[in-house]
Image (cartoon, rainbow, N blue to C red):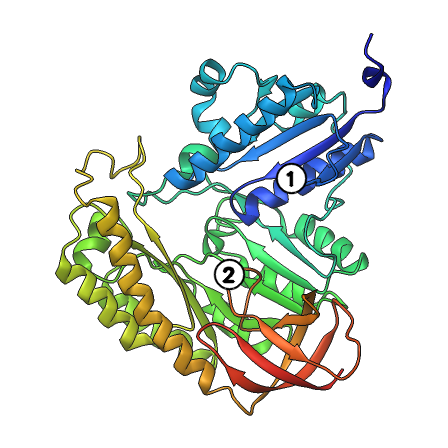
Amino acid sequence: MKSKTLKRDKVNIITLGCSKNLVDSEVLSGQLAANDIDVVHENRKLDHNIVVVNTCGFIDKAKEESINTILSQVNLKKSGKLDKVFVTGCLSERYKNNLEQEIPEVDAYFGTMELQSLLRQLNADYRSELLGERLLATPKHYAYLKISEGCNRTCAFCAIPLMRGRHISRSIEDLVKEATHLVSTGVKEIMLIAQELTYYGLDIYKKRMLPDLLNRLADIKGLEWIRLHYAYPSKFPLEILDTIRERDNICNYLDMPLQHASDNMLKAMRRQITKPEMDELIATIREKVPGICLRTTLIAGFPGETRDDVEQLKAFLRQHRFDRVGTFTYSHEENTGAYDLSDDIPQEEKEERAQEIMEVQQQISFEKNQEKIGGVFKVFVDKKESGRYLGRTEFDSVEVDNEVILNSAGKLTIGEFVHARITKAYDYDLEADVISN
């Protein structure tokens, strides 16, 4: 018998993809810890003997990264450095049968809703009383809060419903309890995530309940920032805007993926909204919440997209001057509504179009940042890298948005707020002098 089999098991969880996957990994970590099993996330010490790869299967690049990660862990197992490799998440949900045939060295594959089965493989019992008691993979001062699972939308490009199922809201009571627990552990910022935030509550309360949830969360003492990600524009519930404006600890920030601005493309993508309707919605949002930061996401190279469609999209950006924009190239996904369309734009051309779009946004971002010079902002100190403190304003979410490089005469505390005056502005980042903390 090998001596290492006598050692205590230690599980390393590798998370790929979006923040929703990260929350799933945190929940798994909390369950394992409650079962007295050693668990780590993205462990660099390599002193673990079991690996769980939580995969992403959203687009081609994400699938490739997931498969490469699985193969690298299987190679470690073959060389005797790991005892077991398990795979879960979206890729496993969508392609489980294929993966079992192609990479049989993995000990077991699990879908997105098979937490209890995965726990049994890890000799752990599911602890239903652990609501909100997950082990954060983020720094302790901020956390994601997943308010629902799945999606009922039928966007032609999207495979998420295939991997995550239909929309299922969590109860307000459970979410408030989880958020309260997170705050008690030191969390000061909570980012609400879902595939579709604005649909929240329709399934269990028979009406849209996001404003009610926001008000309950805003009442939690010690919760300084609440941030909203992934709002769907069609039939957008405008009462959300009143809540954002009225509650001081809800960030003036809204992440609303629009995907395109050409009516031809919006129709082909099945977005259930027109360009004039988006124009009106954006104007209403900015009227009701002056100074709000609007983030959106766009797709380049959808089947049938013409040069005119691209020009319309660039004109749309110049018209509305979004604060933050992300761009993806279209990925042709089987079993989606667009799969029967001809993927007629070469990948190189898709990337060139995405670059064109981002060049427009880069100039807009630079100009908007220049306007901030001399202004004083509340900044959340996130981390220290290469001797410099980095933080964010309420207009910036983690990883995807701007950072503020903080110049301070004294030591700053990670996870604390400071007030800083902007001294320099770049395309996507700011530099500031701390004036009080």
- Mark 2: which secondary structure? loop
Farthest-out residue, bottom: 374
**What is the spatial separation of the Cα atoms under label 2 and label 1, in whole angstroms?**
20 Å
Q: Image quadrant of residue 415?
A: bottom right
Is 69 in front, or is 55? Answer: 69
**Is 256 left or right of 315, judged from the image as shown?**
right
Q: Residues within 10 Å of mark 1 (few under 14, many from 20)?
A: many
Question: Which residue is drawn at the image coordinates 65% and 85% (left, top)?
Answer: 433
The mark lying in front, picked from 2 and 1, is 2
- Residue named by callout 2: 400
52 relative position to 67: left or right: right
The 10 Å Cα crowd at callout 2, few under 14, some 14 to 19, many 20 or more, is few
Among numbered discs 2 and 1, the one appearing first in the sequence: 1
Whole-percent x, y for residue 243 in the image: 55, 71
Q: Which amino acid type corresponds to the residue marked 2 in the rendered image?
A: Val
Judging by the rendered image, the residue that carries numbered circle 1 is: 25
Q: Secondary structure at mark 1?
A: helix
Task: Determine the residue located farthest toward the top in the rendered image.
Answer: 1
Q: Quadrant of residue 133?
A: top right
Please tell me which residue is depicted at 50% across the width and 86% down the height of the picture.
372
Q: Residue 385 in the image: state x and y as whole percent.
A: 67, 65
Residue under the image location 37 percent in, 45 percent down: 153
Looking at this view, is 109 or 111 the one in front? 109
Q: Is residue 435 visible?
A: yes
**Residue at image location 28% in from the left, 75% down from the top:** 318
Numbered badge on residue 224: none
Residue 21 pos. (x, y %): 57, 42
What x and y, as percent, mark residue 323?
Answer: 42, 73
Q: Quadrant of the C terminus?
A: bottom right
- Residue 400, above or below 429: above
Left-right relation of 252 to 124 = left
- Residue 92, compared with residue 21, is above or below; it is above
